[in-house]
């Protein structure tokens, strides 16, 4: 059975995901980093090969997703609503590029560059690409009114949508993506007092985008597209200058001068049934009406056609018979174009030539509430149309162009951006690298398995207090080095080692006025040993209090037998030799994982982590 999952479904899922960060009872989501050990693969001969330069693709298996990512996780930082945004593909405006234009019938529009980002971080939608011509003039108009914002000299028509703020640019712009949002809300508690027109309003936030969204016209016809079958043939056109007009007289007449447009006056009534459009005027620009008769240079216009009404002040028409055209105004005469459909008020006129047929059909008034539309093109019956022109009107997205930019630009991807700044107040390691980035939802506290973890930061290493300082060497246990417990056989990789008496970085045991300060070793990627004795966490094979934490070296593959033991348990606190991860392992949903080549950390370094979640 033929079926399709629409882009609307993808956008809905992305909206639900994004809303989870801001809802009152929303989910808690954390970006995490992990894996200090190298990426390796085993050859057929059993050799282990470092593949850090080409990390493997993650696999969504139970072992990996439910357990493995927890085992090599080293830290996590919470994402809040300001850390997430819809994003769309980034198409930088570049001269000489042919951009696709918006087309309401294009099933693959989501994959095409039909909008651009300019050097000023303004975003424009291409409404018309001048029949596939190259764009050579960058759009620049900041016009927040409805419809086409700007027609550039290369023939392109653009719709200004929004400007990316400096704050959003810093957090959510990459070489491939730019942020997109909507100001409008569907939360009726936030609406203004007047929704009589059916639109959804929120208070003016001072942005151009607010103006764009609220000025959008639902069902407007902004562009009429020429189909592949072409311009047609047999259509009659002419240009003319206005000599005088008496629209308010016994008949609404206009006297035209054809001297500058071919010279000869047209044959009587050759253009009866055609339409006249005022293309340039100081008093009646855009006036459009059907021609009911003409004799020589005097043309009679038909009231209540186009946008010319017969009653003064009639709200259904832009002009009435009190309008005045002045000498020198330019007019275009061509076939009559009627927009048919379920909307109202859409008006168009044709341009072209007697030899080229109809080259374009332009919009005089966009109308409203069109959801389906087609065209009828007619002229004087005495003129023979040998080939019908093939054009179609493009209906706007629901709400009009600019009403919902997330949907219009296919913003079904969401970016999360979290900055890890140095050690984050001595919480995170700055001595090691990482090879994995991911997203976890609704983790649980290790200290209370019935409560969600909600703190900003989470240290996911196991922290071991070492029983004594080792000379003056702060780098005794090296980052990424593998260690083994002398009794348990438990193995782990070193994240970092603090060999100072600094209470901010070393482990503290005891209580009262004289606590004992011990060097602290942080480890991850723990593999339990074969020893059946219960370890520090109540599980057999885990590290044990009082055993040696031995470095595995080339010379001592079984561990350096003289390495120090753990601290001893204090009488008042029997479990503080080993500190567990802040978030309880395996109790939270891993939503996203990305494997990377090693990324080193430093105390003066900021990792600007950007994750793209694609729906």
Image (cartoon, rainbow, N blue to C red):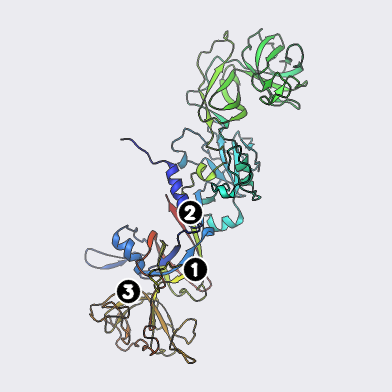
Q: Is residue 542 left or right of residue 379?
A: left
- Looking at the image, which residue is at 60% across and 15% down? 236
Residue 139 can be seen in this image: no
According to the picture, the residue beneath numbered tag 1 turns out to be: 456
C-alpha distance separating marks 1 and 3: 25 Å
Asked if residue 30 is positioned above or below residue 204 in the image, the reply reads: below
Instruction: State the residue in front, 373 or 387.
Output: 373
Question: In x, y percent, where is residue 595?
Answer: 38, 61
**How many angstroms separate mark 1 from mark 2 (CA)?**
18 Å
Q: Which residue corresponds to mark 3? A: 526
User: Which residue is drawn at the image coordinates 47% and 59% (left, top)?
Assistant: 25
- Disc 1 crowd rating (10 Å Cα; few below 14, some 14-19, many 20+) is few
Q: Is residue 63 left or right of residue 366?
A: left
**Residue 498 position by quadrant:** bottom left
Indicate whether 134 appears above or below 463: above
* Mark toward the start of the polypeptide (1 vs 2): 2
Figure quadrant of residue 524: bottom left
Residue 325 rendering spot, x and y as whole percentages: 75, 21
Residues at marks 2 and 3, CA–CA distance in whole angstroms: 34 Å
Q: Residue furthest bottom?
A: 514
């Amino acid at each position: 059975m033929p079926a399709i999952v629409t882009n609307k479904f993808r956008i809905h899922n992305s909206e639900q995901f994004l809303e989870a960060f801001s809802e009152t009872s929303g989910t808690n989501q954390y970006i995490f980093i992990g894996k200090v050990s190298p990426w390796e693969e085993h050859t057929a001969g059993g050799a282990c090969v470092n593949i850090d330069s080409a990390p493997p693709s993650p696999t969504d298996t139970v072992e990996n997703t439910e357990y493995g990512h927890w085992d090599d996780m080293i830290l996590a930082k919470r994402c809040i609503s300001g850390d997430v945004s819809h994003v769309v593909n980034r198409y930088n405006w570049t001269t000489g590029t042919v951009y696709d234009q918006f087309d309401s019938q294009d099933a693959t529009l989501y994959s095409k560059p039909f909008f651009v980002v300019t050097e000023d971080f303004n975003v424009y939608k291409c409404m018309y690409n001048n029949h596939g011509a190259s764009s050579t003039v960058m759009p620049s108009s900041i016009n927040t009114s409805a419809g086409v914002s700007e027609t550039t000299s290369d023939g392109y028509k653009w719709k200004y949508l929004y400007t990316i703020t400096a704050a959003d640019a810093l957090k959510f712009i990459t070489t491939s993506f730019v942020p997109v949002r909507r100001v409008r809300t569907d939360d009726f508690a936030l609406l203004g007092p007047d929704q009589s027109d059916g639109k959804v309003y929120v208070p003016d936030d001072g942005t151009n985008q607010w103006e764009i969204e609220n000025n959008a016209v639902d069902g407007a016809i902004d562009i009429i597209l020429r189909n592949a079958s072409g311009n047609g043939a047999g259509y009659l056109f002419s240009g003319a200058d206005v000599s005088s007009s008496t629209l308010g007289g016994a008949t609404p007449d206009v006297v035209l001068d054809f001297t500058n447009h071919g010279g000869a006056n047209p044959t009587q009534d050759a253009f009866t049934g055609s339409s006249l459009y005022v293309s340039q005027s100081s008093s009646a620009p855009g006036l459009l009406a059907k021609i009911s008769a003409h004799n020589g240079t005097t043309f009679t216009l038909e009231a209540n056609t186009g946008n010319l009404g017969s009653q003064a002040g009639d709200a259904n028409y832009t002009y009435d018979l009190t309008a005045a055209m002045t000498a020198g105004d330019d007019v275009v005469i061509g076939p009559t174009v009627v927009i048919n459909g379920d909307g109202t008020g859409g008006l168009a006129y044709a341009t072209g030539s007697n030899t080229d047929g109809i080259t374009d059909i332009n919009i005089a008034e966009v109308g409203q509430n069109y959801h389906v539309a087609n065209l009828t093109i007619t002229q004087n019956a005495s003129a023979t149309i040998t080939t019908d022109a093939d054009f179609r009107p493009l209906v706007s997205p629901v709400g009009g162009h600019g009403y919902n930019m997330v949907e219009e630009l296919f913003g079904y991807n969401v970016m999360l951006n979290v900055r890890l700044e140095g050690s984050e107040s001595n919480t995170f390691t700055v001595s090691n690298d990482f090879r994995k980035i991911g997203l976890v939802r609704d983790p649980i506290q290790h200290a209370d398995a019935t409560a969600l973890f909600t703190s900003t930061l989470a240290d996911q290493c196991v922290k071991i207090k070492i029983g004594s300082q080792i000379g003056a060497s702060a780098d005794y246990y090296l980052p990424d080095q593998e260690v083994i417990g002398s009794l348990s056989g438990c193995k782990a990789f070193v994240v970092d080692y603090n060999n100072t008496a600094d209470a901010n970085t070393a482990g503290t045991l005891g209580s009262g006025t004289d606590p004992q300060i011990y060097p602290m070793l942080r480890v991850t990627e723990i593999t339990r040993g074969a020893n059946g004795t219960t370890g520090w966490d109540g599980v057999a094979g885990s590290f044990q209090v009082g055993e040696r934490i031995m470095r595995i070296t080339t010379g001592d593959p079984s561990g350096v037998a003289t390495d120090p033991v753990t601290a001893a348990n204090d009488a008042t606190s029997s479990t503080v030799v080993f500190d567990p991860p802040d978030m309880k392992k395996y109790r939270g949903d891993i939503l996203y994982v990305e494997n990377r080549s090693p990324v080193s950390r430093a105390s003066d370094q900021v990792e600007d982590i950007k994750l793209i979640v694609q729906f």
